[in-house]
Amino acid sequence: MESSEQERLALVQQAFNAAFQRRAADLKQAATDEQAEEVLRNIARLERAYLAAAEQALDRTGPQIEAAYQAARDAKRSVDEAYASAKSMAERIARVGDLAGKIGDLVAKAGGKA
Amino acid sequence: MVSRLIIALAGAAALLGGCAAAPRTPATTLSQAGIKASNAFATDVRTLSTQLAYVNAADAFSTTYDWCTNRPTCMPRNADPEVAAKRVKLADTIAARARALDALSAAYSALGQEAAANGSADLEGAARRLVTGVNGYVASVSELTGNPIASAISAPVGEVVAGIAAEIGERRQRQRLLAGSRAIAASVQTLRNGLAAEAAVFDSLSGYIIEHRTAARLAMVQAGLVSRTPTFTAFAQNMGVTPAPGAEGIISSSKPVQAALDATMKANAQADVIAMQQRYRTSLEALDALLAGHRELEQTRSVSLAGIERIIARLENVVDAANADDGAPGGGSNPPPPRP
């Protein structure tokens, strides 16, 4: 079934909220300041994507948009799994980075900027 | 040739105008309802705009606090420049909506003054300012969403200005009131369309703003800069229980109680999100009710205000509840008072 505009915005918002709410714990667990900086950069990427999604209606449709939506959902599931199974900080940062890329791609495509 | 045309137009206007009395009472009541609705909405909107712009400060505080409490080094952390700029742009859009609502309030005020004193009110000027405000808002929302909402309004102002000059006495006031009502209604419709187009964005952003505000509040609380006692006091009051003597000391020394009150604060913040969304919907309903009132005035020369008053009472109720919270929506520290 095709995703709705509201479902896409909700996914983007959930991705940002989750990263934002984990910020303090992630900063504490980061092994180096560089890792901690990477945590903040990922949050900023997700927040930029969220604000862009809030500006634009994510109302484009088509196979490309569905593929981007599914990829973002899978990436979010992968992040949730990494935190649930206490993967290493480096692994979690990498997965959130991947999620930020997929979310950015979804917003760009569904919002008509790609 | 020209003079014959003018005479013919004047005759047509006289026929259209008829001998009916000016609808002063319905125009006055519609004016009062319009002022109430637009003022309530504008106040709420202005607060939201300020809060959104202030997320940059809240974010800087909570990010720096999180960094400095969890890293060996400590330095100020400002928001990502692109994120900060986007927040300010959104806040500007919302501020434009508040300005349009201010203009709407002024136009309704002029309508009421016209009804009270024939010909003395600056109805045309108010209508012009309203159209300028609404068009500015519509342009801003169209840019924000990337979707054009409606074309700019210009015809109603011309109608007001051109339709009034030749009229005299009772008929003149009647024409002025009806033309003014039409001009305002056209602007209300455009404003309403803009607000409806923005509703989905607003719903989402209300949660976003409160997320940031709650993070900053919790950081202040955890730093010991702000007391948890107001959250506890409001919670106890809502639960119908009286705080024990020494409760404040228990709060300051018990980690489980502190964690529980922080969780309460977060839950209250979620209630704030719902309340903000409810206010938005109610304000839209108020504008719809005003539009119905304008149509009624046009068709029957009277207005039954029961529907408008009911919605405005609801609007005032939700706005009052927000103000009772902590003076601004998104407070998150105190729950709204129990509803009867």
Image: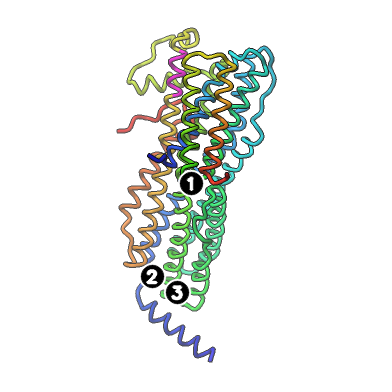
The stretch drawn in magenta includes residue B116 = no
Disc 3 versus disc 2: distance between alpha carbons?
A: 8 Å
The residue closer to the viewer here, B211 or B32, is: B211
Q: Which residue is mark 1?
A: A60
Q: Which residue is mark 3?
A: B172
Estimate the x, y position of residue A83 in percent, counting from the top left: 50, 17
- Residue B139 appears anywhere in the view: yes
> Disc 2 residue type?
Ala
- Residue B220 appears anywhere in the view: no
Whichever of callouts 3 and 2 sits on the residue coming sooner in the sequence is 2
Q: Name the residue rendered at 52%, 18% in the picture.
A: B227
The answer to whether the residues at label 1 and label 2 have Cβ atoms under 8 Å apart is no
Query: How many C-alpha atoms fall within 10 Å of the one at disc 2: few (<14), some, or many (≥20)?
Result: many
Disc 3 versus disc 1: distance between alpha carbons?
A: 52 Å
Query: How many C-alpha atoms fall within 10 Å of the one at disc 1: few (<14), some, or many (≥20)?
Result: some
Q: Is residue B23 above or below residue B43?
A: below
Estimate the x, y position of residue A66 in percent, counting from the top left: 46, 39
Q: How many marks?
A: 3
Q: Secondary structure at mark 3?
A: helix
Q: Chain of mark 3?
A: B
Q: Quadrant of residue B222?
A: top right
Q: Which residues are magenta?
A: B258-266
> Disc 3 residue type?
Arg
Q: Nearer the viewer, mark 3 or mark 1?
A: 1
> Disc 1 residue type?
Arg
Query: How many C-alpha atoms fall within 10 Å of the one at disc 3: few (<14), some, or many (≥20)?
Result: many
Q: Is residue B49 above or below residue B147?
A: above
Q: Chain of mark 1?
A: A
